[in-house]
Image: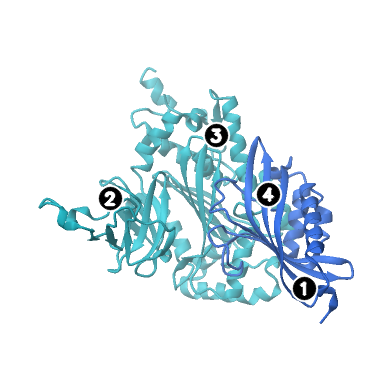
Amino acid sequence: MPQAASALSRADVEDFLFAEAALLDEWRLDEWLALFTEDATYSVPSTDSPESEPSDTLFLIADDAGRLRSRVEQLLGKTTWSESPHARTRRLLANVRIRRTDGARIWVTSNFVVYRMRSNQTAAYVGRYEHVLERGEKGLRIQSRRAILDLESLRDVGKVSFIL
Amino acid sequence: MSHVDDDIQSGLFRVHRQAFLDPDVLAEERARIFERCWIYLGHESEVAEAGAFQVRELGVRKIVFVRGRDGVVRALLNSCTHRGAEVCRERRGNANSFQCFYHGWTFSNEGRLIGVPGEEAYGTGFSRAQLALREAPRLEQYRGFWFVSFDPEIAPLADYLGGAAEYLDLVADQSELGMEIVGGAQSYAINANWKLLVENSYDGYHAQIAHARYMKYLASSGAVGLPEGRKWNSVRDLGNGHACIEYTAPWGRPIAHWVPAFGESAAPEIAEIRAKLEARLGPERAHRIATTSRNLGIFPNLVINDIMAITIRTFHPLAPGRMNVEAWSLAPRGEPPEHRRHRLENFLTFLGPGGFATPDDIEALESCQRGYASTPREWNDISRDTGAAEPPITGEHQMRTFWRRWQSLLAPNVTSLREGRRAAGR
């Protein structure tokens, strides 16, 4: 068994997730994207189907690595009107748990509240993250990142125009 | 006053911004439009088995869209006939009966009252038969699309749909096995008047600017050309306020136009779907279904956009400046899993509150609504291509079709025509 994964503590994982959240809140999206592996995915299920897969269920977001790169590029560009000027966001992460390790892979769940402030409105996105992390030569990388909303619908928040 | 200013001679068409702001207009819309038209309820695939139900919010009303054990589809109002509590408290599922949790009255999935605790306490005037769950006065379907109306006297659905039926056929004909709603509903709200989403859903003028980032993404994903064959660019007034734009677009279509973003491995599959369509429907109709994109608006609040995927979208006003939106993905039943995956990925590139386009539409609509607050006495100009014999999709003929119907229902005695106003000496 590779000792790398087994040696990882929750504090190590928390440091990584907190740093990731800071990059997003600071809109350093290029640096955030660099945290992902080449085959990474980013997804947000529809609110009525939180436990499903994007291959057979309509999600809100189901990016492969190519669409994720494009999403970041779009969000950093000037014609993504819904986020230009971009919103303020603030993420609160808690209840970080390492759920499983397998070789270099680590399955991590955490709870989140992400506040988005724009046009004098505040929206609170509540849910949990499921990260699949990979430990490699450059440290931890994200292989899969799913944000599962507890909201019953998006009526209170409107849309998911930023990286949740 | 008329909120629509329709000057045919000078080619000017304007809509007053009070139409988006005035609470009295919304009250009139509820009474004269939402109570008097056919309103989309759901798709047959959502209540395929006996007992299957979905609770639908149609404005202030909650309706249980359900298939009873007798196989009949019904639209039951979600309110106990005893003292009014909601009898169905799940959003969807399968049930033999609905029991009110307040006093325990129980209704079958056909709406019949089948259980009353302590029934012996009632007198001879008490009748279970008269206490069935109330139903929407009218419920009809066309090709699996179910609609309700609260006007018992309304014309049959097929008459109401008029020319829109042809475009529903172009969707329903995509599979010999029928169509189905894919799991996962996109449920959101927009802080804008509901009619802004009507306009936006078939607005061909805004795409290049509002969706600049999507167009750039599309080009970078390898979709640069249009499908081979006839190029479409047409707008049709389908009667009763319904309109459709039909056009040839550069994006891929799961049924059935391949683009590089689908991957080389998907090309044979798309070719096979296309060949099956041709065999079943003939080359001309198959070509039209496969290569044209169609944004259909069924008056007042149903949009079926068959573009890079099929979305069904319906929306209800909560206030002049706010609406709830429900959107689904419609797909051929029995589609191979790999193809279903491509379809859903293609859907999400553009559509939905996390897509590469819809968030910018939402932004635009909310921006309009804020703009109206600053200019409540001004008019919107909807005059593009008023003079065109065959208006293009970048014009606004489709919106004028909606607005003329809207005005005629809202204020049947007020003409929107300038000429008419002059003749009446106003």
Residue A156 or B195: which is nearer the viewer? A156
Q: Residue at the location (33% across, 49% down)?
A: B85
Say whether mark 3 and mark 2 are on the same chain.
yes
| Mark 1–mark 4 distance (CA, rounded to whole Å) | 26 Å
Contact check, label 2 and label 4, Cβ < 8 Å: no
Disc 1 or 4, which lies upstream in sequence? 1
Quarter where residue A146 is shown: bottom right
Q: Is residue B117 above or below residue B386?
A: below
Q: Position of residue B360 (x, y in %)?
A: 65, 45
Host chain of mark 4: A
Q: Position of residue B64 (x, y in %)?
A: 36, 56
Q: Is residue A79 above or below residue B88?
A: above
Contact check, label 3 and label 1, Cβ < 8 Å: no
| Mark 3–mark 1 distance (CA, rounded to whole Å) | 59 Å
Q: Position of residue B410 (x, y in %)?
A: 38, 34
The residue labelled by disc 3 is B383
- Element under label 3? loop
| Mark 2–mark 4 distance (CA, rounded to whole Å) | 44 Å
Host chain of mark 1: A
Say whether mark 3 and mark 4 are on the same chain.
no
Residue B206 in view (yes/no): no
User: Comparing marks 3 and 1, which lies closer to the viewer?
Assistant: 1
Colour chosen for chain B: cyan
Colour chosen for chain A: blue
* Residue type pointed to by label 3: Ser
Residue A77 in view (yes/no): yes
The residue labelled by disc 2 is B137
The residue labelled by disc 1 is A105
User: Comparing marks 2 and 4, which lies closer to the viewer?
Assistant: 4
User: Comparing marks 4 and 3, which lies closer to the viewer?
Assistant: 4
Say whether mark 1 and mark 3 are on the same chain.
no
Q: Which dot marks residue A114?
A: 4
